[in-house]
Image (tube, rainbow, N blue to C red):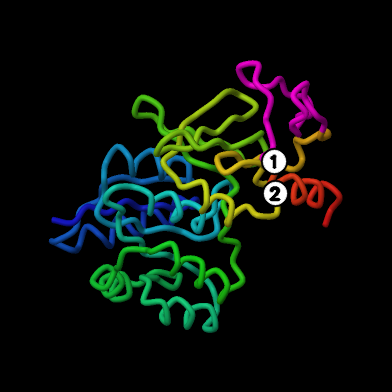
Amino acid sequence: MMRVLIVDDEEPARVRLEQILSDFPDYECAGLAANGEEALRLAIAERPDVVLLDIRMPGLSGMEVAHHLNALDPPPAVVFTTAYDEYAIEAFEAEALGYILKPVRRTRLEAALERASRLAPSALSRLGASTELETRRAHLCARRQGELRLIPIDNIVYLEADQKYVCVHHSDGEDLIDEPLKSLETEFADRFVRIHRSVLVALSRIERIDRNTEGKSQVILRNHSQADGKALIISRRHVADVKRRLKGG
């Protein structure tokens, strides 16, 4: 029995999918979510095998939710529901991703479920480029004592590698996430700058660069006390690049 999580911001769409799903003996509904944040909470709690995921939703988009779902272990298969035109559908098919064109029909849902495949980050990026969808996340996702915490990228001050985790220092405190610092640097290259092999700082949070009493370059943050009273030292190899980025280069 395959367990399916249904995610759509429109109640009639959720009801229709649940009704159609009830006709399939090999599938059962694992839950209904009206938005991306609720979908992630249910996915963590219920561990569905498949997620039927609407792309256009307020708040977290389906594409962003798919990013976070892919980080689960194991990740669920993702089947997108979409009202996009044939050009976009061709891109979905080219990547061998499951999709359902709205309005959803029984035969279409059955076929999509049968070929649902796990969504790799590389495939998601190519899909976004092909369909002109925004795939870069607006949030990072942390889990604290079994609960989901979404951290807006705008609230992040800096990211610091901490053994196999990354510590996210943000406006409301700190959280650990299980993502490589390098992949975060690539995804958010226009918003963060590397000042050290283990630290990325939000460009918008840097007030200036000065030198400490030992003559080392350090970042002074805007409207934020240095965590634990420590300064953010810039390694010599990164000083020139940090200065260039601050000048808009």
Q: Is residue 126 above or below residue 15?
A: below
Callout 2: few (<14), some (14-19), or many (20+) C-alpha neighbours within 10 Å?
A: some
Q: Nearer the viewer, residue 203 or 3?
A: 203
Highlighted magenta segment, given as a residue range? 210-235
Residue 81's disc is none
Q: Is residue 88 magenta?
A: no
User: What x and y, as percent, mark residue 119?
Assistant: 37, 63
Q: Which of the two discs, 2 and 1, labels the residue nearer the N terminus?
A: 2
Q: Residue at x 61, y 71 (%)?
A: 132
- Quadrant of the rendering where the N terminus is positioned: bottom left
Disc 1: which residue:
202
- Quadrant of the rendering where the C terminus is positioned: bottom right
Q: Residue at x 61, y 24 (%)?
A: 172
Considering the numbered disc 2 on the image, is that residue within a helix, a strand or a loop? loop
Q: Nearer the viewer, residue 49 or 238?
A: 238
Q: Nearer the viewer, residue 112 or 192?
A: 192
For the view shown, which residue lies furthest in the top direction? 229
Disc 2: which residue:
191
Q: Is residue 215 magenta?
A: yes
Q: Amino acid at mark 2?
A: Arg
Total numbered labels placed on residues in the image: 2
Q: Amino acid at mark 1?
A: Ala
Asked if the residue at tag 1 contacts the one at tag 2, i.e. Cβ–Cβ closer than 8 Å, the answer is: yes
Q: Residue at x 61, y 30 (%)?
A: 170
Considering the numbered disc 1 on the image, is that residue within a helix, a strand or a loop? strand
Left or right relative to 229: residue 210: right
